[in-house]
Image (spheres, rainbow, N blue to C red):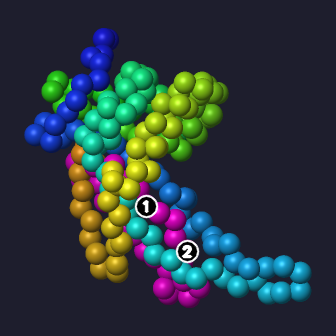
Amino acid sequence: MERPGPQRVGLADPPATRLLARTGRPAGTPGAGTGGAGRARRPAPARRPETLLASGHTVHNRLLTDEPWALPRLYQDFHFGRGTGLDRLRPVFQRHGAELRGHYNRRGIERAHQGAGVPLPSDDHAALDAVDRILSDPHTVLHIPLRPGDLLWLDNTVVLHGRTAFTDPPAPSAHRCLARVWAD
C-alpha cells in the first residue's frame, strides 16, 4: 500500500492524530533523598505531576519545518505494544483520507522492538529523537497541574499527552489516584 508523504496540516483539518506521548519519567520515580554513611535517608518532598499536552498538528508541522528528513521514516511502520494480542505494526504518522493520524510512545516503541527482537537502527532513533526534541520545546507543550477533583477530558485523535515525574507524599492516604476511561 503506497502511503502519501508528509504534508502540512492545518487546524481546520479533521481530527489529526491518534498520538500518545509519554514524556518525563516513569510513574512513581523516587526522589534523590539525602544519604551517606551514618545518616538516615530523608524521603524526597512530595511533588505533584503536571499533565503535558501537545497538538498533533503542531508536532507534525514542526517536524515538516524543522526536521523534514525525519517525517518519511515516521510514516513507516514501527513495532508498538508487546505481549499476546498487543503486538502490532503501525507508523507514527499516517493519513486516512484527508485526516492525519498518529501514535507516539517512545518507550513503547523501544520496548516493542526489543521484545520482537528487531533492534531500532540509528536512523530510527534519530527520527524518534526529532519528535522528542519538538516535544521538549516549552512552546509546543502545555503544562497543566491537575489538582484533586480535576477532570481532564481529551481526544486521543488530536492531542499527545503525558506527564512529568512525581513523588507521592509519605502518608498512604495522600497518595495520588488517577482513573482513566476510554470512550470510543
Residue drawn at x 44%, y 51% is: 136
Q: Quadrant of residue 4?
A: top left
Taking the image as shown, residue 13 lies to the left or right of residue 81, namely: left
Say what secondary structure mark 2 lies in: loop
Q: Residue at x 34, y 73 (%)?
A: 146
Dot 1 falls on a residue whose secondary structure is strand
Vertical position of residue 112 compared to residue 51: above or below: above
**Taking the image as drawn, is residue 94 in sight?**
yes
Horizontally, residue 106 falls left or right of residue 60, namely right
**Residue at the image point whose x is 32% and y is 38% from the top:** 62
Image point (50%, 57%), residue name: 24
Q: Position of residue 137 (x, y in %)?
A: 40, 51
Q: Is residue 109 magenta?
A: no
Q: Which mark is residue 167?
A: 2
Compared across the picture, whether 96 is left or right of 122 comes to: left
Kind of residue indicated by mark 2: Thr
Q: Distance between the residues labelled 2 and 1?
A: 12 Å
The amino acid type of the residue labelled 1 equals Arg
- Vertical arrangement, residue 121 with respect to residue 180, above or below: above
Q: Quadrant of residue 131?
A: top left
Residue at mark 1:
163
Farthest residue to the front: give it: 66
Image spot of residue 135 (x, y percent): 41, 48
In-front residue for pair 62/41 = 62
Residue 96 in the image: above or below residue 54: above
The x, y position of residue 122, in whole percent, is: 60, 26
Q: What stretch is highlighted in magenta?
A: 159-184
